Image (tube, coloured by chain):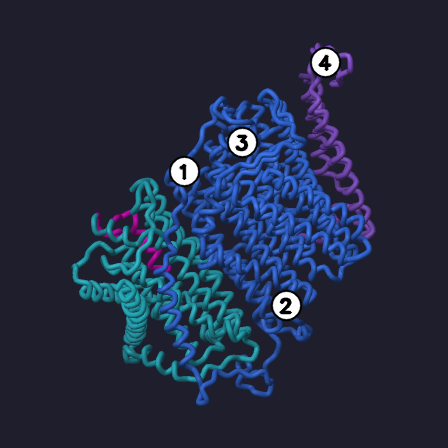
Amino acid sequence: MEILKSIFYILVFPGALFTMVAGLWLAGVDRKVIAKMQKRIGPPILQPTYDFFKLMGKETIVPRVANRLVFLGAPVIGFISLAIIMLFIPIFGFTAFSGSADLIVILYLITISGVALIVGGSSSGSPYAGIGISREMVTMMSYELPFVIILLTVAKKVGGADLVFSMDAIGAWQRANGSLLFQWSMIPAALAMLLVIPAEVGVQPFDVAEAETEICEGPLIEYSGAALGVFKLNTAMKMIIMTGLFTSLFLGGFTTGIVALDVLIFVAICTVLTLLCMTTIHAVTARLKIEHLFRFYWTFVAGLAMASLILVWCGL
Amino acid sequence: MMQHFPVLAVMLLFLSAFIVEIFGAKSKAVAQGIAMIAATVSAGLIYALIKPVMIDGQIISYWMGNWAPVEEYAIGIGYEVDALSLFFALLVVTTFWLSGLYSIGYMNKDHHLGHYYTLYLMLSGSVLGLVMTGDIFNLFVMVEIMTFASVALTAFRNFSEGALEGAFKYLVIGSMGSSFTLTGIALLYAECHTLNMAQIASILAGGLSPTAIAAFGLIIAGFGVKSYMVPFHTPAADAYTVAPTSISMIFSGMVNKAGVYGMIRMIYIVFRAMDKGTVQQMLAIFGAVTMFLGVTMALAQHEFKRLLAFHSISQIGYVITAVSLGSALGLTGGLFHAMNHTLFKGLLFLTAGAVLKQVGTTNLDKLGGLSKRMPHTTICFLVGAGAISGLPPFNGFASKWIIYQAIYTKAVESGKFVYVLCTICALVVSVMTLASFIKVTQAVFFGQLRKEHENVTEAPFSMRLPMYIMALLCTASGVFYDFVNKYLLHPAANAALNISKYIDAMMGPGYAANARVSDMSVEPVAFSYWNPIIWLVLFGVLFIGAALVILGGRNERGQILSSSDPSQAKYDTFFSGEKEMYSQVGGSDLFWGFKSNWKGYYKFMEAIHSGIVNDYASMAVVGTAVICLCMFLFMR
Amino acid sequence: MIIVNYIASIILIVLGLYTVCTKKNLIKVVLGLGIIDYGVNMLIVSFGFNDGGTAPIYQMSDLLNGVSTKFFVDPVPQALTLTSIVIGACVDAMALSLVIMIYRKYKTINADEVRRLNG
């Protein structure tokens, strides 16, 4: 019975299937709203889903200079790591798996999905991919610093004298004491997280790694067919995961008690967050250059996160 | 019978060094054979000690020449193997055995192999003796033998660029470090009038006098030079680059662990200073600076082995920070990371050696696309790179995670903000390590193959076998962490924190009680992230993911195609419509955005690492001065 | 407690460190290493001094009488110093042989020019 339940969690909800569906929904909403902002009609909301199934049916071409094993294995590794993360993120009181160090595991799994993109691009042997992975890695280095500071801040705030890295415990604390967003010392950290999300997912203005006009999609240039479909799916899954992480870290304070209703409210909040931190910024800004991106994250965003850490450290 | 094993292991290595020198000059096979037999027997003797020392908890003590203590006073040289010593001894024997195996293939075109194996055996014997001795002057003598053998081996290929220079700098800085250690030992002798570490520990239990504090500072500086902490790290970069790769692997795997072992032994057992806030903070700050400096310098390198050398320095920074915290969690994390560093850094150096031997160069700007010609080396390299970056399921993840937890817990317990900065530094350095290895992957293994490397072959099997073994150990020690903890780490951490047993085993029962030596109790460290449910998760999701990629994407005949035929343009890489040509993005072209932001820092760093011996010596003197000053001003 | 010896050995060590840190000729650097070693050796042997003691050698007559009335200096530091002198000699020999080979290869022994490995 336990095994069946675990398999259900892994494969259907909140594991692979739920993440895929919710991620593709968010990607569709994102595209539609940008189009409306730009006075176009835009594609239907299910367009990313259609794209995914279309790509599944296309032929995968492996370039001559590519390392075949790594080339085909990289999207699979990325997919696995992202599907596992969702199992650790609590949806307003319902957690599939919880350990004592979820935050660090989530941090590393997100890193692995980024590494999967990088290694896949590198193995394709194209020089455009080489430039793309260099930029992607610098982007990862840029947003890791504020991201770890935010996680350390949350751990200290919730735990007090002992540190708490477990998502379940963070959720329980928020249900008892009110959401973290409403503690005023955590507001800079929340702002920093809102700025980290677009860089992780790779939307403008932080998508210099996939700059379509300069390096023709960067790491993904030689990908086609099912492998490309899985990579695009990974990007969509990252949307729901990052906004879901923000929701459970900063807005986890209430629950209605019914799992299905909680899930709907969760996805609704994630949609609002997507519109706030990804769509709006995407529609109104241009792309940053890589050195500006690095400087932005290591000065402004890290400064916000650090301000929160110092406030929490002083006991506020 | 068991108590003779440590001395036998060490003496066998020294004896066979002399035998190889006499008989090995004429024939390569004789030299190799004697060296491998000696290494295997020695390794077997040390592995046989696992059961009594680690599992049953005995401490093996052996007095040379049977000079047992007379009237509670130690007069002979004692060898004492407790769990901490055995932990490091296991690392040492594994490393030099695998290195010997690798040398068979790697050094087969060099001359004077008799001398090589003599020096190799002396180096191994000296490090093994270092970790197992209980006498402080014997420790110093072993350190000196290690320095000589290392310097001679660094300069072994004296025709290659920079070998002599690297060896000279290593000798100067290393000798200065040894002199500091000797001064510290002399001061310690003046204070305690004995050379036996157990007896010194019980004499110093009453409190540290100013002489003892001075001795402590100097000895820590001396062992800092041996373990390549900043600012003593400069000869490491040169020496690791120019030494033959099988020796570089020994350097990064054994020699700097000897420095770390010396530090742990001094801090925890002899001086019992691990609960003094000054020592903890000073070493934590040194460790954090080492981590950061190592990795940022590594990102700017153009040469594969020099990059690996800077990463070695950075990872030892992790170990020093973890060990300095004075808690059981920190010690476990530090020891585990030391073990993992030996495994994954050894693996990375072996792959670098394979590339050097097969291709002829390790310049990152001149390589590329080798994964097509050397697939096994590529897989081993990817395992090593994943382990060092701390990706699950490799061992780097487990040990780094324990270290992060240890530092942050210490920050919260002691309330000092400096530990929070150390945690942030550790996490950021981890990402930068990952970046550095992505750079090497792209520059060496992926990307486009140069015309002149089109006939490169895979490394011979005798060179690949140690790589496979180490890759397997990397993965196994990450996955079966509980097993490693129960049998290796927990006894070792326990031994470092329970000093009275150490003293009693050496000097006779009841001695420690007389000297009012007190203990710390250690609970095993729980590590609950890895349980069978996770296996189920991975399996299920792997299945879907593989299915997605494999089932989709086939053409009408059901295959995923590729072709090595250059006339099929479908399989060319995309060049915006132009003809395909050689264009490799590698080495210095990567991470431009990062490097341009840190221009001032890199200019300063490159000016400091000028290659001039005097500058390096001044840095060492300044480092020692800072350590001694910290000790004196703040030791409370 | 011979203050003069201690001060002299500290001065030797400092002079040796100064030489290693500032002199450009590689042979002078090696000499500096040697001076540090000699300073440390003197420090060690001075630690063993007991005022009024003789050489630490038993004669047959003392042993046969059963009780020794001799008061001698500590023999252990003398043993340590002998070992250390030998080690110092080996370091100097190895360093000088490296300097000879460096001269053959680089045609100079100025530290400012022997710096092909840098950065």
| The quadrant where residue A87 appears | bottom left
> Would you say residue A18 sits in the magenta stretch?
no
Labels 1 and 4 in the same subunit? no
> Would you say residue A184 sits in the magenta stretch?
yes
Please say if the residues under marks 1 and 4 sit with CB atoms less than 8 Å apart.
Answer: no
Residue at the spot of label 1: B416
Give the position of the C terminus of chain A as an image quadrant.
Answer: top left
Tell me which amino acid carries mark 1.
Lys
- What is the chain identity of the residue bearing mark 2? B
Label 3 crowding class (10 Å Cα cut-off): few <14, some 14-19, many 20+? many
SS for callout 2: loop
The label nearer to you, 3 versus 4, is 3
Tell me which amino acid carries mark 2.
Leu
User: Which residue is at a point 52% across and 24% down the rendered structure image?
Assistant: B511
Residue at the spot of label 4: C53
Please say if the residues under marks 2 and 4 sit with CB atoms less than 8 Å apart.
Answer: no
Residue at the spot of label 3: B505
Q: CA distance from mark 1 to mark 3?
A: 38 Å
* Chain letter tied to cyan: A
Residue at the spot of label 2: B367
Q: CA distance from mark 1 to mark 4?
A: 53 Å
Labels 3 and 4 in the same subunit? no
Q: Which residues are magenta?
A: A177-196
Q: CA distance from mark 2 to mark 4?
A: 70 Å
Query: Which badge, 1 or 3, is on the more N-terminal residue?
Result: 1
